[in-house]
Amino acid sequence: MFGVGILVGLGRRLVAAVAADTGLLPAGYYRHRVLAALEEEDFEAALRYLPWAADAVLTQVMILRLRLLQARHARRQEICRQALEKPGTPEEKARLGEVLAAEAQATRLLRQYEARAKELLAQPS
């Protein structure tokens, strides 16, 4: 009996993995996937499952999380800009420039994710 239970569990996981990107599973499954993706900060995956989760509150939570991360990156950019104005070695300035560019890229990416999430909110249920 124990072996049958394991096989059934594996079968369910296999079917869920195959059917996950079809939108055929219950909305609760997709809500779970969105929450798991948000916990891992995998916003691509969260955005992939959000339309099937059909949960406006969850979408708003994601937008809030994205905005908080954008604010954190904006603060880091400001710190880098202030540090670039201070005297330092060329190596330090080059490194700060690299960090500033990476923070700007992260901010742009988060804004794109936010725009996509807002589009989902604008769509009729």
Image (spheres, rainbow, N blue to C red):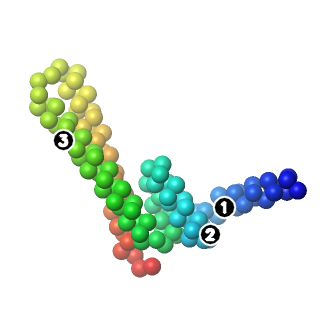
What secondary structure is marked by label 1? helix
Query: Which residue lies at the image location 47% right of the left edge and 65% below the top edge?
Result: 50
Q: Do callouts 1 and 2 mark residues in contact (Cβ within 8 Å)?
A: yes
Cα–Cα gap, marks 1 and 2: 8 Å
Residue 81, position in %: x, y? 16, 37
Q: Earlier in the sequence, mark 2 or mark 3?
A: 2
How far across and how far down the image is residue 92, in percent?
22, 24
The numbered dot on residue 36 is none
Give the residue number, with chain letter if any, for mark 1: 16
Q: Residues within 10 Å of mark 3 (few under 14, many from 20)?
A: some
- Left or right: residue 54 compared with residue 101: right
Q: Residue at x 19, y 37 (%)?
A: 79
Q: Tag 2, which secondary structure?
A: loop
Which residue appears at 36% of the width and 56% of the height?
Answer: 65
Q: Residue tagged by mark 3?
A: 78
Residue type, numbered disc 3: Glu
In-front residue for pair 21/42: 42
Q: Residue at x 75, y 57 (%)?
A: 9
Say which mark, if any, is on residue 25. Answer: 2
Residue type at numbered disc 1 = Ala
Answer yes or no: do the residues labelled 2 and 3 have beta carbons within 8 Å? no
**Residue 117, can we see it?**
no
